[in-house]
């Protein structure tokens, strides 16, 4: 039979284990929240806790303050490095500041955190919703001969092979290598390759060029649609909505999709 002290010690150990597990879960939730990896329901629940839990606000603010120090340097902060930075900052705090100064500091941080969290959570949520909308509405155009208006069959065969096999980098390289020749590869197809390789700036440039050719261009309507999608993926909401409005006004083939996508972005 266990004596009273042994039972007490075991109880304390179990209690501490529960506390440690809870801390790990909170830390994981904070990390997922900052990265925008929580589901919509989880995000709402977490933000409701932020409103009432002062300590949680401090933890989030602390994570953000550390990450922001390195964000401008373009460094990718891994979880292990963040934990090391926390220990360094805590040690500095104990060495260089009195308890009174720490209280004042945390008070200021907490006040600032409320504003920072609102702004960051809005941006994270907005980007999350745009990514989700893009994933739901983006489909690659089917390849057909009209998409590749090369002046020989070998060109069409190469383009078709690259496109159908998802070799988009090779397709882009081939397009670049033939730009100064008489070979003409449809820029809608190349724009899609740029979207697939996440070179959105170049995709947007080419799609705007396609649109500027006017409605005599057989890819005119498709160029508008993929431009709206490219802006969506690039998190350029204002530009995406402008293009979607034009698609709707023009009574385009993509009108119904444009209406639904616009509702997702507003």
Image (tube, helix red, strand yellow):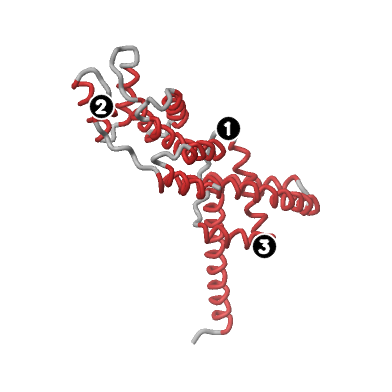
Seen as rendered, the residue at the extreme right is 100
Pick whichever of labels 1 and 3 is earlier in the sequence: 3
Q: Name the residue under label 3.
A: 53
Residue 34 lies, with reference to residue 193, above or below; the image says below
Tag 3 near tag 2, CB within 8 Å: no
User: Of residues 113 and 221, which is closer to you in this image?
Assistant: 221
Q: How far apart are marks 3 and 2 (CA)?
A: 57 Å
Residue 264 lies, with reference to residue 1, above or below; the image says above
Q: Name the residue under label 2.
A: 159
Q: Distance between the residues labelled 1 and 2?
A: 40 Å
Answer whether residue 79 is visible to the viewer in this image: no
Residue 257 image point, x, y percent: 42, 46
Local crowd at mark 1 within 10 Å, few (<14), some, or many (≥20)? Answer: few
Pick whichever of labels 1 and 2 is earlier in the sequence: 1
Q: Distance between the residues labelled 1 and 3?
A: 32 Å
Tag 1 near tag 2, CB within 8 Å: no
> Residue 73 has which mark?
1
User: Of residues 178 and 39, which is closer to you in this image?
Assistant: 178
- Identified at 72% across, 53% down, the residue is 110
Pick whichever of labels 3 and 2 is earlier in the sequence: 3
Q: What element carries label 2?
A: helix
Residue 99 image point, x, y percent: 78, 54
- Between label 1 and label 2, give the one nearer the viewer: 2
Local crowd at mark 3 within 10 Å, few (<14), some, or many (≥20)? Answer: few
Q: Left or right? Give the position of 70 relative to 176.
A: right
- Identified at 59% across, 37% down, the residue is 70
- Identified at 54% across, 57% down, the residue is 29
């Amino acid at each position: 039979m266990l004596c009273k002290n042994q039972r007490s010690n075991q109880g304390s150990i179990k209690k501490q284990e529960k506390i440690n597990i809870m801390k790990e879960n909170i830390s994981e939730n904070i990390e997922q929240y900052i990265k925008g990896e929580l589901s919509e329901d989880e995000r709402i629940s977490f933000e409701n806790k932020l409103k009432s839990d002062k300590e949680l606000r401090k933890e989030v603010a602390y994570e953000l303050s550390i990450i922001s120090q390195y964000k401008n340097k373009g460094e990718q902060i891994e979880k292990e490095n963040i934990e090391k930075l926390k220990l360094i900052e805590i040690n500095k705090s104990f060495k260089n500041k009195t308890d009174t100064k720490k209280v004042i500091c945390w008070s200021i941080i907490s006040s600032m955190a409320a504003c920072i969290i609102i702004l960051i959570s809005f941006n994270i949520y907005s980007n999350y919703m745009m990514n989700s909308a893009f994933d739901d509405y983006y489909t690659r155009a089917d390849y057909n001969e009209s998409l590749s208006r090369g002046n020989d069959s070998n060109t069409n065969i190469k383009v078709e092979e690259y496109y159908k096999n998802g070799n988009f980098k090779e397709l882009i390289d081939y397009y670049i290598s033939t730009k100064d020749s008489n070979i003409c590869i449809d820029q809608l197809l190349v724009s899609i390759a740029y979207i697939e390789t996440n070179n959105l700036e170049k995709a947007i440039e080419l799609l705007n060029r396609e649109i500027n050719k006017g409605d005599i261009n057989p890819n005119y309507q498709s160029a508008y649609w993929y431009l709206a999608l490219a802006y969506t993926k690039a998190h350029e909401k204002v530009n995406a909505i402008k293009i979607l409005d034009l698609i709707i006004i023009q009574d385009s083939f993509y009108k119904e999709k444009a209406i639904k996508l616009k509702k997702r972005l507003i």
